[in-house]
């Protein structure tokens, strides 16, 4: 039996919901690990938005007919695996902070692209409520990416200074 567009969108929204849940968990781990106060504050700010994004995605999935996905997100698993590989090498804290900053930036950029694609599909369905929920999520993620990109140069300069002092 062929999958129709609505079912496909429900599947993609459900997968995005699992991605957001998994990345929220990883973000919580980052908060406890980050030593740089600017990074920690940025992650705490994002934690609040994760809950909003998860709620919006739950509404979207329910509106489209319920969950069609189970299991962990392969994307989030990849981010977590890379982080754990770095952590397993027991690097100095400034390198761990750099890894957290880079992972957060990469995850935001990826999520924006995924939301953009989802929004294109939901527009085709004509689901205005779902468009509204996903648009809010994309806007939250764009604010996170902007915040990371605005603060990244100064944080990287701080971390590079720690690297020079350690060398």
Image (cartoon, helix red, strand yellow):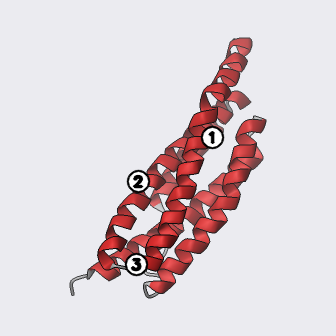
Report crowding for label 1: few under 14, some 14 to 19, many 20 or more residues within 10 A (C-alpha). many
Q: Is residue 151 left or right of residue 40?
A: left
The residue that mark 1 highlights is 100
Q: Is residue 71 left or right of residue 114?
A: right
- Horizontal and vertical percent position of residue 155: 67, 29
**Residue 35 shows in this picture:** no
Q: Is residue 94 above or below residue 18?
A: above
The residue that mark 3 highlights is 10
- Horizontal and vertical percent position of residue 66: 47, 86
CA separation, marks 2 and 1? 20 Å
Of the two numbered discs 3 and 2 on the same chain, state the one appearing first in sequence.
3
Q: Is residue 98 above or below residue 22?
A: above
Q: Residue at x 49, y 71 (%)?
A: 132
Of the two numbered discs 2 and 1 on the same chain, state the one appearing first in sequence.
1
117 or 99, nearer to the observer: 117
Q: Nearer the viewer, mark 3 or mark 1?
A: 3
Q: Residue at x 66, y 66 (%)?
A: 51
Q: Quadrant where the N terminus lies?
A: bottom left
Report crowding for label 3: few under 14, some 14 to 19, many 20 or more residues within 10 A (C-alpha). many
Q: Residue at x 33, y 65 (%)?
A: 120
Of the two numbered discs 3 and 1 on the same chain, state the one appearing first in sequence.
3
Q: Residue at x 53, y 50 (%)?
A: 142
CA separation, marks 3 and 1? 31 Å
Secondary structure under tag 1 reads helix
Report crowding for label 2: few under 14, some 14 to 19, many 20 or more residues within 10 A (C-alpha). few
**Residue 115 shows in this picture:** yes
- Horizontal and vertical percent position of residue 17: 52, 69
């Amino acid at each position: 039996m062929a999958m129709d567009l609505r079912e496909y969108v429900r599947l993609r929204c459900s997968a995005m919901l699992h991605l957001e849940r998994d990345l929220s968990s990883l973000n919580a781990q980052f908060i406890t690990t980050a030593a740089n106060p600017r990074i920690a504050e940025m992650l705490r700010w994002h934690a609040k938005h994760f809950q909003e994004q998860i709620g919006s995605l739950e509404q979207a999935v329910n509106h489209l007919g319920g969950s069609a996905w189970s299991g962990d997100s392969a994307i989030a698993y990849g981010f977590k695996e890379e982080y754990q590989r770095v952590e397993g090498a027991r690097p100095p804290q400034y390198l761990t902070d750099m890894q957290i900053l880079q992972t957060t930036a990469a995850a935001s950029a990826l999520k924006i692209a995924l939301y953009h694609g989802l929004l294109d599909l939901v527009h085709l369905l004509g689901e205005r409520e779902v468009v509204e929920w996903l648009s809010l999520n994309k806007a939250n993620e764009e604010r996170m990416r902007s915040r990371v990109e605005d603060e990244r140069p100064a944080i990287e300069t701080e971390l590079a200074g720690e690297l020079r002092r350690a060398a």
